Amino acid sequence: MTATLTAPRPSLVPPFRSSASPTALPNRLDSLTSLRFFAAFAVFAHHFSGHGKGTGYGTAPALFPYSMIGGHGVTFFFVLSGFLLTWVFKPQEHPLAFYWRRMARIWPASLVAAVLGVYAYYIAAHEHIDWPSLLASLFLVQTWFPGVTPTLPGNEVTWTLSVELLFYALFPLAARIAVRYRTRTLALATAAGLVGMWAVNWWAAANFSGPGEGWIMRNPLVYLPQFLLGMTVALAVRRGWRLPMRPIVPVLLLGVFVYGYYQGRASLPDAVVAQLDYTVRPVMALLSMLIIVAFVQREINGHRGVLNQPVLILLGAWSYGFYLLHHSVSRLATYAWGRAGDDNSVLFDLLGVGLVVTAMSWALFHYVEEPAAQWLNRKLPQRLRRRWNASPDVPPSVEVAGARVPSAR
């Protein structure tokens, strides 16, 4: 390592001190934008393949059961949000300006996608609408309260935005606190939080069942350690910490973990399998962190690879829309044509539906997400804009898919 995890005491150094020259930190992190698409596609593959036993549009033996880990693509998003928001954190920015820009980016596209979601999950499915629960989902607070009907109301996938919303609410204060602590202290707090995720999962499984356990494990408070992990690593990298590791290493580790996780479930005792389930969220968070760090270090060192290709960067830019739309489209395809079956020919259906969702996500980005964010940001009150513009030390950013990507634009 070129530096330790320990930063000098905050009273002696600026929060973003780096052992390298300022020019060593890139204004763009294109590889992280591209990775966002792969995480969204993993969630899509999970929903498309289902949980087995006739669920989903169709189950391909070549992917199943490994595709089920794709649901934890949201873990990557949570860690990445903490990382990128901290990477571009401006201490002088007014918290209300931060909230304004966050909602300008995520809410308009979410509302438009909710129209398709309501049609897919309620109208086409002939389900009763519980209006308070649906309204909670439109305002992205559905996971904050128990007893919503159904357990994932509105556009089902937006439960993760409800988790993000709490993090956004806390971030201006949390970031101002975090930058004042040594990296070692933050790392210990993060480790304790991840252990707490495991403990809460175990406790919830032992004391609750069904909707109660599900609500606890979707509660935004449970996921705060994953955001903190992203924040801690962003500060560590900005302060000069480096991990000598090529991106292929954490990618292979992810593959080995997924293979071992599902192979182990078939042969290990029930008690051990339960512990695997309780630890999967913290483990996936750590693997996400390693992948993020590995690719960020490549960009800091000036290396460009396949994830820096324009096509993948565009797909990453559209990935927020892809995430919002994919489950609704897959559900409607199932209603229209029935389940495709449980053989590998389903892979062609998966790619076909994926292409349709990609085209729709392009339209959502270009005609809703991006213009709405630009229009709303122009409406940012002048008193808040002055404080935002008064902080030139960190480059501005382009907001993509519910997080932020530093940009030279």
Image (cartoon, rainbow, N blue to C red):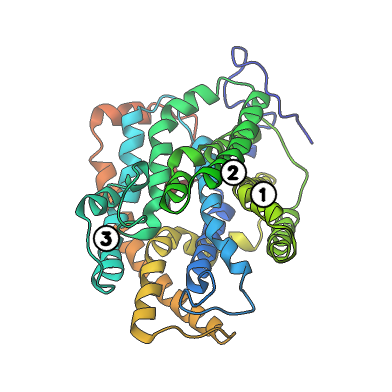
Label 2 and label 3: CA atoms lie apart by 37 Å
Q: Quadrant of the N terminus?
A: top right
Nearer the observer, 18 or 292: 292
Nearer the observer, 391 or 290: 290
- Which residue: 57% across, 57% down? 35
Which amino acid, mark 2?
Trp
Q: Where is mark 1, residue-wise?
A: 275
- Residue 144 in view: yes
Give the side of residue 376 with respect to residue 151, left or right: left
Which amino acid, mark 1?
Gln
* Residue 264 location, quadrant: bottom right
Marks 1, 3: nearer the viewer: 1
Which numbered disc flags the more N-terminal residue, 1 or 3? 3
| Secondary element at tag 3 | helix
- Which residue: 52% across, 75% down? 53
Q: Are marks 1 and 2 in contact (CB under 8 Å)?
A: yes
Q: Where is mark 2, residue-wise?
A: 202
Which amino acid, mark 3?
Val
Q: Where is mark 3, residue-wise?
A: 112
Whole-percent x and y of residue 347? 55, 81
Marks 2, 3: nearer the viewer: 2
Give the side of residue 184 with respect to residue 140, left or right: right
Query: Against 274, is 43 above or below?
Result: below
Whole-percent x and y of residue 225? 55, 37
Label 1 and label 3: CA atoms lie apart by 40 Å
* Residue 243 location, quadrant: top right
